[in-house]
Image: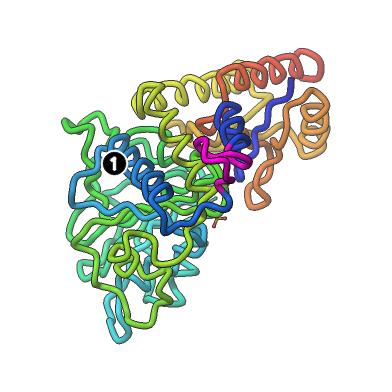
Amino acid sequence: MAWNFAAGPALVAPNVLARLQDALVDWRGSGQSILATPFTGAAYADLQHQAESDVRALLGLGDDWRVLLLQGGATAHFALTALNLTRPGDDRPADFVITGHWSRRAAAEAAKVVRVHVAAQGDGRSIPPVGAWRLNERAAYRHLVSNETADGVQFQSFAGLPGGAPWVADMGSDLFTRPLNMGPLDAAPHDAAPFSLIYAGAQKNLGLAGLTVVLIRDDLLGRGRADIPAPFDYTAQVKANGRLNTPPVFAVLAAALSLRALREQGGLAAAAQRNAAKAATLYRAIEASGGYYHCPVAAGCRSTVNVRFRLPDETAEQRWLAAAERAGLLNLKGHPAAGGVRATLCNAMPREGADALAAFMADWVRRWG
Ligand SMILES: *Cc1c(COP(=O)(O)O)cnc(C)c1O
């Protein structure tokens, strides 16, 4: 039995894979492949509608939200969000909260379009306290990354995010792993506030690469510039019901199947519990190693999706990674920007995968620690 801890594209659940396999040859008993299903027809419209309404139900989005199933990946939407929220000549800055690799990449891309103001600069191990952020009163929008996939740093709550400008979030690696508003202080678990725009690639927790989920509040529509290529103009896509051009139909089907499975398994509160339990198993294995393994991330912002740790030195890390691979624990090498070991516990990773890794970690310390 092998367990695949790849960060992205990440694991797809076996039952989703089996349904995709069937749909390649015969989708919904039509005798036709999903790959040759016209996106202008009723069958695709129905699939898209089902996916969108499951997104709404899982996240508790109100009627003022639009759900777009686009292409480009989060990396394209770093600049596309800026193009859709500002116009040429607009001298207002965009506030960026830098907490690691992906927020740095997001800020660098957005800087091609808007004046980026770094409101906070983390060290990749912790999140600067909200009170210390230097937010710009005139910001056109504000941007954060909810889970730093490379660094293993994750916001535990969004309670207390200051208002005043629309918040945009790259939730590339943790959208659909937990309810949107999980702060203990929040009375309303189904409120997407404080965010106005959220985007995430589907290849982490919702199936396949090629699909980017963009959630946008109505009041942000119509703020973009006129020269955005139409497929990436959020307002134009909303007007065209998300079918302005050919959507990635196969990836939309994978997302629809993954969303339905999430609902059947108790929704996002249940998913959050499962993910927290998997992560706790690994953080416990780190703590139990008597200092052999070391998690560089501060206790209050350790990710439940990407668990990062180091061994005493790089030689030991390389031997460990090779031995893990031989033991069927795959793709544990850390992101090049961060080094060390990274275990990705996306939605599709079962509890048994985390348990197998924790057992391997303990066994290694008994032998070599
Ligand atoms: C994976 C990831 C990205 C990049 O996604 P692409 O689809 O490769 O563009 C951006 N942000 C976060 C947080 C990610 O995890």
Compare residues 95 and 121 and report the one nearer the observer: 95
Q: Quadrant of residue 174?
A: top left
Q: Would residue 166 appear left or right of 203 to someone viewing this image? A: left
Can you name the residue that lies furthest to the bottom here?
89
Residue 293 percent across, percent down from the top left: 66, 27
Q: Which residues are magenta?
A: 23-34
* Residue 308 visible, this orientation: no
Residue 241 percent across, percent down from the top left: 32, 59
Q: Residue at x 26, y 55 (%)?
A: 196
In what quadrant of the picture does the N terminus appear? Answer: top right
Q: Residue at x 44, y 66 (%)?
A: 245
Compare residues 274 and 279 and report the one nearer the observer: 274
* Residue 17 visible, this orientation: yes
Residue 296 percent across, percent down from the top left: 57, 37
Q: Is residue 282 above or below residue 223?
A: above
Q: Which residue is mark 1?
A: 56
In what quadrant of the picture does the C terminus appear? Answer: top right
Q: Residue at x 76, y 19 (%)?
A: 364
Whether label 1 lies within 8 Å of ligand 1 gets the answer: no
Q: Residue at x 52, y 35 (%)?
A: 29
Colour treatment of the image? rainbow
Q: Quadrant of residue 284?
A: top right
Q: Would residue 189 appear left or right of 200 to someone viewing this image? A: left
Can you name the residue that lies furthest to the front here?
31
Residue 243 percent across, percent down from the top left: 39, 61
**Disc 1 crowd, CA 10 A, few/some/many (<14, 14-19, 20+):** some
Q: Is residue 299 above or below residue 100?
A: above
Q: Would residue 214 appear left or right of 367 to someone viewing this image? A: left
Count the marks.
1
Residue type at the position of mark 1: Arg
* Magenta-span inclusion, residue 118: no
Compare residues 282 and 242 and report the one nearer the observer: 242
